[in-house]
Structures are given as C-alpha cells and as structure tokens.
C-alpha cells in the first residue's frame, strides 16, 4: 500500500484509573503494562508499518512536554496541542485541518491507551484498513473505516459495530459494510447482536484519507470542522480563542454513526488481544493475559513491593510502601503516596465517580 501515517489521540483524564492517573499525568503517560508508557507502546507497535517521523500526536497542550519526552524520535512539528479537550471529533478535525500530507495517504487514528497482544496481526489489520480507506485498486472511492474487535462475550461496556451482508476480502481479511453502530447495549441486546455473527466491539480505531474525513465532517459536523479550520491558519492564539466554543462530542457520534446510514463506512474485524484498559478490572485482566502468555499463573498481578498469601483475581500496584495481601478474591489495591484505593474488581467502574467527586470538592472554596 502507499504510505500511511498515524494520529495518536492522547487525551482524556483517565479518571477511572484514579489514584494513579491524575490530571498532571493521566493514563496515556503511565507505565501500566511494563517499563514503557501506554503512549510509547502505542507508537512502538506501529513500526514498521508507520515510521516514527510519520507519527502525529493530538493532546492537551499541558502534556506537550510529556509527549516530547516519551516520543523523542517524533518530530516536534508532529505534536498538535489542543488548548482544551473537546473530545475526539474536535481532535480528528484538528488533525485533518493541520496535517499537510498527500491526498492518497491513509490517516490512521488510534487512542494512546490500549493494549494489543498480537501486534503483527494488528498492523496487518491496519494495513488492510488503510487500503480500504484509500480506495480499491479499480478506482472505487475511499471509505471511512473502523476496526472492530471480535467479541469474546456479551460485554455491555463497549459500543458495537453491526456489519451487513457477506462482505469482501481485502489483503486476506474480510471487510464489511457497516449497517449501524449500537451504543453500550444491555446484556440481552448484546447476546442478540452476537448471535447474528456480524457484530464487533467498537475500538475507536479508524482509517481514512484527509479528503474523506474532511468531507464527512463538513457534511455531518460542519460546526466542529469549520471553526477549527479557520483557526489553524491563525496560529496558537486563534486556536485558543476558537477551540473552547467547539461542540464536545466523539467522532463516533459526530460522523461515523450518521455516515453509516449512507453506506459510507466499512469495518475490518480483528482478534488481536485488545483491551481498552478502561478500568482497574480491565487492567487486571490485561496483566493476567500477559502473565499467562509468559507461562505464569496470573492469580495476583501488579508491581511494586508486594507480598501475597493465597489471593486470586487480584491486582496490586504498590508505589512506596510494602503492601501485604492475604486471601483476597477479585480485589483491586492501588497504593500511591497520597491515596490508597481498595475496591472489589466488579465495582471498579465506580472509581470514576469518586475521582470526579474528589476533584469537585477540591475546587470548592475552603
């Protein structure tokens, strides 16, 4: 395929991973799965499909120094700093307006904070998505492409991509037209979707050309694209004025869902050991998968000074003190210098609400 480039979205507060993920150093910039950070792992797994000089990062300006420190091989000009976070539709619009690349190159969009176990298979799926995004060899127009995760069960925490028909084969992989997107269904609805055999989890990973996504934004979300386009040429000051007034919504809601109704979206399913690491329980499961792949039991996972007796299904991250656990089942223990979190793994989604409540309390007058 022709050249591709990647845009990594390194935003979000990561409040579901409090107390380790904080506003000054959120989730993408933390080494949660080893010695390197999630952002570094995201960039590294793209090679050799995407060279370091062809990687761009969209992030809050507050984190520009962190990005430069963690991705030293990426050119400084490839860092796009947002004045404020306005969700993924604005981030994509900013990238489409600011990055000057040839029209026949595929733009890959990837979150900075996911786990992928099968990196070779992942790059293969990205390459196919890039080919579909650019257009078929017979000259057919390019498409908006999403990469779907083959579901392992009726998960209710993810959105779903529902495919239509038998699909085509590109590069040895099936490619389907997207019928519609389904947002976080009930367990019963998720089981119905899986029974149909054409449903994937929505991973928030996309491919398109600049021309294709700009046209789609102009059609479905002109109120997001146009002020950002107008401000890009005016430099950081103009962007700082325009950006806070831009509607905050995801690229899924703004473009992909309405575009799917026009038959303009394709999905490339993949099974690559993916996790969005969206909660402490998800991180525990990701570390368990890596441990078992390395031949370990994975009963208790984590890092730091930790001793355990007879626990199972437990994640422990100890940063400063020695943490001792005895006989725990399905428990999360996160120790930091100023906070200690202990919760049942099946309640780890509630951490976000606690973190937000604590943040609001700190903002109130004393």
Image (tube, rainbow, N blue to C red):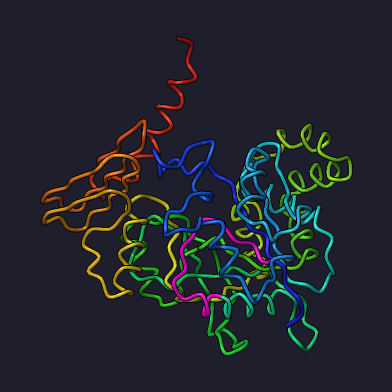
Q: Quadrant of the C terminus?
A: top left
- Residue 274 lies, with reference to residue 237, above or below; the image says below
**Identity of the residue drawn at 78% across and 72% down:** 105
Query: Residue at left 69%, top 47%?
Result: 90
In the displayed image of the protein, which residue is found farthest to the top?
A: 366
Q: Nearer the viewer, residue 193 or 60?
A: 60
Q: Nearer the viewer, residue 59 or 201?
A: 59
Residue 117 as seen in the image, left or right of residue 332: right
Q: Write the residue at 12% across / 54% down.
A: 309
Q: Position of residue 125 (x, y in %)?
A: 57, 78
Q: Quadrant of residue 342?
A: top left
| Boundaries of the magenta span | 108-122
**On the rendered image, what quadrant is the N terminus found in?**
bottom right
Q: Is residue 111 left or right of residue 226?
A: left
Q: Is residue 118 magenta?
A: yes
Percent coordinates x, y for residue 60 in the rendering = 65, 42
The residue furthest right is: 233
Say whether residue 191 is magenta.
Answer: no
Up-down relation of residue 282 to residue 319 (above or below): below
Q: Is residue 173 above or below residue 28?
A: below
**Of 140 and 270, the residue lying toward us:** 270
Residue 42 screen position, x and y as percent? 56, 62
Q: Position of residue 19 (x, y in %)?
A: 39, 38
Position of 273 compared to 39: left or right?
left
Q: In percent of the image, x 75 and y 57: which residue is there?
A: 75
Along the line of sight, the residue nearer the viewer: 250 or 191: 250
Number of callouts = 0
């Amino acid at each position: 395929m022709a050249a591709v480039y990647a845009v990594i979205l390194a935003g979000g507060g990561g409040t579901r991973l409090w107390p380790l993920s904080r506003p000054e150093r959120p989730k993408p910039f933390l080494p949660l799965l080893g010695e390197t950070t999630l952002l570094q792992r995201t960039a590294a797994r793209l090679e050799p499909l995407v060279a370091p000089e062809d990687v761009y990062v969209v992030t809050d300006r507050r984190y520009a120094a962190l990005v430069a420190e963690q991705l030293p091989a990426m050119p400084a000009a490839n860092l796009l700093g947002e004045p404020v976070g306005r969700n993924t539709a604005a981030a994509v619009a900013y990238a489409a307006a600011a990055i000057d690349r040839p029209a026949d190159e595929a733009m890959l969009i990837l979150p900075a904070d996911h786990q992928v176990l099968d990196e070779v298979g992942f790059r293969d799926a990205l390459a196919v998505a890039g080919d579909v995004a650019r257009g078929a060899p017979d000259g057919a127009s390019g498409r908006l492409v999403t990469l779907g995760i083959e579901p392992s069960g009726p998960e209710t925490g993810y959105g779903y991509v529902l495919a239509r028909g038998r699909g085509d084969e590109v590069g040895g992989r099936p490619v389907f037209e997207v019928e519609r997107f389904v947002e976080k269904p009930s367990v019963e609805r998720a089981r119905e979707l899986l029974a149909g055999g054409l449903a994937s989890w929505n991973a928030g990973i996309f491919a398109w050309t600049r021309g294709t996504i700009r046209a789609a934004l102009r059609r479905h979300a002109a109120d997001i694209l146009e002020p950002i386009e107008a401000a890009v040429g005016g430099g950081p000051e103009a962007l700082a004025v325009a950006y806070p007034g831009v509607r905050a919504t995801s690229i899924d809601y703004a473009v992909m869902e309405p575009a799917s109704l026009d038959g303009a979206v394709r999905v490339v399913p993949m099974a690559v050991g993916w996790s969005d690491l969206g909660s402490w329980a998800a991180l525990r499961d990701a570390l368990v998968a890596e441990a078992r792949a390395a031949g370990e039991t994975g009963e208790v996972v984590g890092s730091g000074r930790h001793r355990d007796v007879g626990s199972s299904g437990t994640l422990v991250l100890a940063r400063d003190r020695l943490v001792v656990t005895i006989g725990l089942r399905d428990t999360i223990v996160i120790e930091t210098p100023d906070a200690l979190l202990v919760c049942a793994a099946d309640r780890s989604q509630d951490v976000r609400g606690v973190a937000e409540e604590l943040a609001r309390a700190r903002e109130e007058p004393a």
